[in-house]
Amino acid sequence: MSTDTTKPVVSPAARRSLKSSSGATSTPLSVTLGRYSAIILWAGFTILFGILRPDTFLSSVTWRLTFSEGVVTAIVALAFLVPLAAGVYDLSVGATMGTGLVLMNWFGLNHPGLPPWQVAIGVLAFCALIGFCSAVVIVKFRVQSLIATLGVSQVLLAFQLFMANNRQLTGAFESSWLDLGNGQVLGIPVVALYLLVLAVLMWFVLEHTPVGRRLFAVGSNPEAARLAGLNVERLTYGSLMTSAVIGGFAGIVFSMKVGTYNSSVGPGLLFPALAAVFFGASQFARRPNVWGTLIAYFALAFGVKGLQLTFGPGTFWIQPLFQGAALLIAVALASRVVGQTRRSRQLQREAAADDAQAAGEATPPPR
Amino acid sequence: MNALDIRGLSKTFSGHVVLHGVDLTVKVGEVHALVGQNGSGKSTLIKILAGYHSPDRGATATVLDQDLELGSASAADRLNVRFVHQDLGLVNDLSITENIMLGRTYPKIAGVKINWGKAKQIARDCLARTGPPINVDRTVGEFGIAERTRIAIARALPDNDDPALIVLDEPTAALPARDVEALFATIRNLAAAGNSVILVSHHLDEILSVSDSITVLRDGVKVACVATSEVDHDRLTTLIIGGSLVKNIERPRVATGETPATVQITGLEGTALLSFSADLHPGEIVGVAGLTGSGREEVAALTIGREPRSAGTVTINGDTVDAGSPIAAMAAGMAWICGERARFGVFSTMSVGTNLTISDLAPHTVVGRLDHRSERAETARWIDDLGIVASGPDAAMTTLSGGNQQKVLVARALRLEPAFLVLDDPTAGIDVGAREQVHGIITDHASASMSVLITSTDSDELARLCDRVLVMSRGRVVAELRRGVDLDAPSIDHAQVAGASA
């Protein structure tokens, strides 16, 4: 650019278009409602089935039962949430839960002398190793997380079938261990308290510590995170190991509650957990988050429970329908929001490109 | 009858005139070069011809005496005006036949099955018009860049033997020197077969050796249309840059030669970059200039460890920084702003504050817990200090304009108080006002203890900010311009253009 070039002037029109695309901060009502849709749904179900089935749906037994039944799946959902914050899909959470369960029961059956809490610690360590292996495949061999963890989950299933000898496996635990899973504190199922403690812990780490901040940064833009000085590899290792340990914890809680392993237990939990996380990610701050996940999960669980109570035992097909529909709608809504931001970004780019053109074609326009 | 005749072509972007009444005449069977600096309007002209932009009212164009509607891609295609862009647009996993048949209709047997024999014959015919035969069953990825360019040209040729006008947009920018001759042979073959060629290039010696005539654009105006035989190197350089070489020194700075260099970059080597060395003294701002393909693009990426380097070391205060590791570079006291903001810098789903503080959260961490309040306070200070237009620290990053996003990234780097700041094209794609502000921020915050390396395509920017500018060409530093001696924007332009042809 020679010095006699007159300074190009940005036209007011370009500025206006930039402002109009970036200045709109008022949130439409539909978006606000969408962010609280899980709570609204839960309240709606409570009112609807409260009117239809006041005697059964509103009883404390039903609520206690629904919460205590849902705890294990909800823990699996929280396991899925950790790597998802960093943009990594861990589809092996269900299988990890099954692995934790089969190990608990196998030791309970074959080594009744070992205290269950010692076995539980061993199980958590083993699950951490599973997460480490998944991370090696993803980080070192650069396999997509979706593929890697899908493969790992099948290997884990094989391990479970081998351990259980392709049969149901019930651990013969002392009653003190089962009490840990079936007791109540102030009328609240004790397992629900485990979930609550875990949720508070995870919420604190994800929202209020540097580690959580960095996980979300990696999830937002891994390349930018690396260039901002974050150790993306270590965060990936950490998130997958944490997710596997939480998955193993879900298996341990299940062993306290029911005790019986069969090969469909773990994989069966994956989908409901996933639906809860993605539905939950459309709530509140609109990114994967702990409370959104839990509220989404239990809103759906209570909906299913209400339908079953109202329409009787013939409605066994309700649950997958519900969860499938919830996942589809939640993700569709979320991508609509993403689409909006992408559109505004597109507008910005165009305005910037026009400016650049006016400034002497410093950059080629986007194609 | 001319292969292309454009009269009175103007183009205005948002009130700024990019092309002003440009005429362009390409004779049948000639190789016509189109030259000019970045921003001279030549790429806009090509884009209008390709139908990407529409011209302002009043322009006319004919191809072989037939009217061409400018701004229409299909009209240009119908009149056999074809384009080969720098990235070629080939699919490397497909065979030559499949690549050439992309965008063509496959011949079929009985209307169903592809007639591969015939398809290969079409591919062979197209290739034959550009040079010696190649086995069309091989995949494109097996070939080097020179052959790939030839395949892309073959694909652009019309099916029948009608003469075509082929536009080659910077075909040699990515080409190693030894392959350039092969490409020239292809171009000469094309012209000999009755086709016409428009060649857009920065490399003057290449233009002088292959073209028949040259049109020179400067600041959107056609300044010359000459036969290649009538000009030499110096004359062409003067035509491109124009005017007298006025010294332009806005910011005198004290010489820092007495203090020892704290940052030493030695023998940096990448793919297009063959060797880059620089010593930076504390308080010094050093610029790196160079045309596309000169290796300038890689200097910052290799210095900060964004890309792995083949050779070379970076030393800060005597400590060697590990190669290919941004974490190590940051620990050694470096900070940077990468080009391509959206790809390398911005966390689009996060707030302004989180984007700003992400590289160092320690000041806001109290016993493991993030103190959101002190984080917001610091963000608000930077918003104030750098004049970032945002509704507040919690505003979503995507609600900011490009220039303000860039200022957030500048703040992210500056708050690390680096000993060595690397700015990779810091004002690319942001508007003029923001550019001025970013320049102001850089000069204000460049302290006596900080060394700054700026790579830029904008000579004006380098001339304003830098104490020294290293000019790159063909992977090496070919010139060094010093403030107060010979540093100004035209000199940078001159060294770039002259270096590319040396």
Image (cartoon, grey):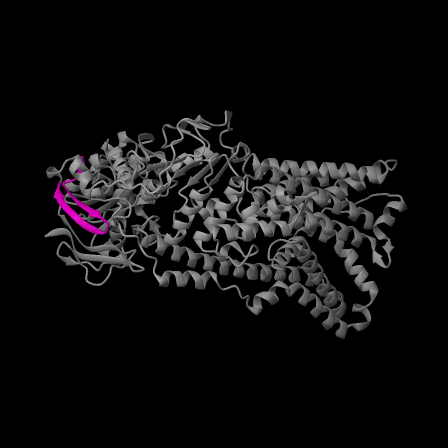
The residue lying toward the viewer, choosing from A123 and B403, is: B403
Q: Please give the count of numbered marks on the rendered protein.
A: 0
At horizontal 58% and vertical 43% (from top left) the residue drawn is: A145
The residue lying toward the viewer, choosing from B316 and A216, is: B316
Q: Vertical placement of B59 versus B121: above or below? A: below
Magenta residues, start to end: B209-227
At horizontal 89% and vertical 46% (from top left) the residue drawn is: A176
- Residue B62 screen position, x and y as percent: 16, 56
At horizontal 32% and vertical 44% (from top left) the residue drawn is: B460
Q: Quadrant of residue A318?
A: bottom right
At horizontal 69% and vertical 36% (from top left) the residue drawn is: A129
The residue lying toward the viewer, choosing from B170 and B313, is: B313
Q: Quadrant of residue B239?
A: top left
Kindly tell me whether residue B131 is visible in this rendering.
no
B215 drawn magenta: yes
A187 drawn magenta: no
- Residue A295 screen position, x and y as percent: 69, 59
Asked whether, in this view, residue B492 is left or right of residue B280, the answer is left
- Residue B350 screen position, x and y as percent: 55, 52
The quadrant the N terminus of chain A occupies is top left
Kindly tell me whether residue B391 is visible in this rendering.
yes
Magenta segment's dominant SS is: strand
Residue lying farthest to the right in this orientation: A175
Q: Vertical placement of A157 versus A359: above or below? A: above
Residue lying farthest to the bottom in this orientation: A51
Asked whether, in this view, residue A183 is left or right of residue B501, the answer is right
